[in-house]
Amino acid sequence: MPHSRGYFLSLFRNVGAHPEIAAETGSIEMLRSLVANGHGVGLLATDVPYDLTYDGRSVISRPVAGAPLPSRVVLIRSARVRPTSSMTRFTALTRERIGV
């Protein structure tokens, strides 16, 4: 996934590896379908809770061993919009739970 590219490359750099990237896609299901049809392996920053792809083939998910770097998580909102009470509560809960 292009938006995860830098994160995953940093994990490889930290162990001195330089993977050869054959293809990239912006679609989780496209990646899963390519893998299910024998076109390599893929890395995802999220766990998909089912093993069947849209074309009916299956994939196997395995966690990556080791202690990966934490992902950078940010909260964003428009600077032009005054925070609502729901936004304020969500921000407080997020900060409490994951420390953003």
Image: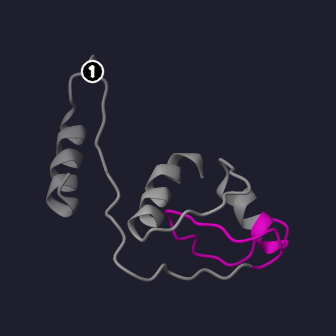
Q: Residue at x 76, y 70 (%)?
A: 40
Rendering coords of residue 55 (x, y %): 85, 67
Q: Residue at x 49, y 57 (%)?
A: 9
Q: Which residue is mark 1?
A: 81
* Front in this rendered view, residue 97 or 10: 10
For the residue marked with disc 1, what is the amino acid?
A: Val
Report helix, strand or loop for mark 1: loop
Rendering coords of residue 3 (x, y %): 52, 46
Above or below residue 84? Residue 80 is: above
* Front in this rendered view, residue 58 or 42: 42
Q: Residue at x 58, y 66 (%)?
A: 43
User: On the rendered structure, is 91 left or right of 52?
Assistant: left
Q: Mostly what secondary structure, the magenta segment?
A: loop
Point out the stretch of residues depicted in magenta: 34-58
Above or below residue 23? Residue 65 is: below
Rendering coords of residue 62 (x, y %): 56, 83
